[in-house]
Image: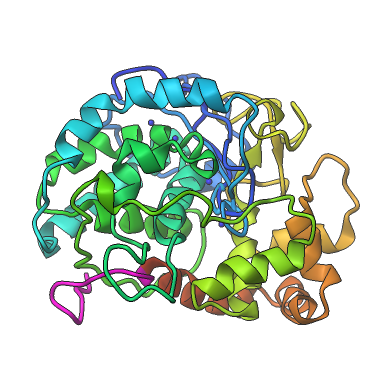
Amino acid sequence: MAERVSITLNNNNGSFLLSPPPKSTTTMSSSLRTTTAASRLLRSSSSRSTLTLSASTSLSFARSLVSSPLLSSSSFSQKRSRVASVNRSFNSTAATKCSASSDPDQLKNAREDIKELLNTKFCHPILVRLGWHDAGTYNKNIKEWPQRGGANGSLRFDIELKHAANAGLVNALNLIKDIKEKYSGITYADLFQLASATAIEEAGGPKIPMKYGRVDASGPEDCPEEGRLPDAGPPSPANHLREVFYRMGLDDKDIVALSGAHTLGRSRPERSGWGKPETKYTKEGPGAPGGQSWTPEWLKFDNSYFKEIKEKRDEDLLVLPTDAAIFEDSSFKVYAEKYAADQDAFFKDYAVAHAKLSNLGAQFNPPEGIVI
């Protein structure tokens, strides 16, 4: 289904999943005028973070994923250069082996820090996308770990971060950089998935039945080849979605449920080639103004994505080819209609699908995982 170091980045509200990989990133101002949706997400809490926020989104899979999806950017060559410079310090520690398992107490404390980050930086979409893109490279036909891809933290390495579908995710890494340094007893793989699930929950979504203990891939040589993540505008959208998600071991219900994460985030045409430069829903932020969202309240997780895609009544709301496919394909449509009418049903199926995605390809220590 939607963002922050000591350098200034752009946009903190992106879209993940099947939305264009790039999204908008923005520096937040203390005088930021928030929308109704954003205010619902805010809790009164003091900010301990001094990071500057930026964001991007995409269903990077099936939407932003938050924020979500995986479109190639017209300014991709420029992004390659920025990734190399901005992420250099992050990778200096990423290249070292992490502990095989995460510390339960540190996971709990890190979750609270992530909540604070979300409440101050509005970076829900890009953090969702971060977790989805790390896990979404899984290939069920490859048995060896980490060659099979999946949730193993390999997205922290430049070689994978520079994949076109991951454009802008350097901003997500910088947003959580201080948290990773503070809690060294957490693997990157676990931190990415913890941030993603927490973002969904803090945006008003369902409780995700997560487990932790993922082991990290140890070096750039463990990164998957480019091309395993979904695109937002393929020639045959429904077939493309099935090709990508079936390879992961997911089914039609999972595809449609995960697409619903596009309720979060927005797309910027200068980054992904999709969407409008600005709409009545995005012209005042939160974060840097501009871009086009899938829903009016694009920082609120609910079933409005399905309602809006079905009606297509507002030209200010984005509908990608992969979005339209869920109501055009007969099998997808069964679930899309159900979720448009019943938010509880959507939340139930989404929670299961998100948890399933977060475990793809992961190697757990202990084998049964850790529940916090």
Q: Left or right of 370: which side holds 298?
A: right
Q: Nearer the viewer, residue 197 or 152?
A: 152
Q: Nearer the viewer, residue 205 or 40?
A: 205
The residue at the point 43 percent across, 20 percent down is: 81
State which quarter of the image contains the C terminus: bottom left
For residue 361, above or below residue 92: below
The residue at the point 53 percent across, 52 percent down is: 227
x and y percentages locating residue 295 in the rendered image: 72, 49
Q: Left or right of 13: which side holds 321?
A: right
Q: Is residue 350 visible?
A: no
Q: Nearer the viewer, residue 177 or 242?
A: 242
Magenta residues span 359-372
x and y percentages locating residue 32 in the rendered image: 53, 23
For residue 136, above or below residue 370: above
Q: Nearer the viewer, residue 114 or 19?
A: 19
The residue at the point 18 percent across, 53 percent down is: 109
| Residue 342, quarter of picture | bottom right
In the rendered structure, does residue 362 fall within the stretch colored magenta? yes
The residue furthest right is 313
For residue 269, above or below residue 230: above
Q: Is residue 186 visible?
A: yes
Q: Left or right of 303: which side holds 112?
A: left
State which quarter of the image contains the N terminus: bottom right
In the rendered structure, does residue 41 fall within the stretch colored magenta? no
x and y percentages locating residue 9 in the rendered image: 43, 22
Q: Left or right of 365: which side holds 333?
A: right
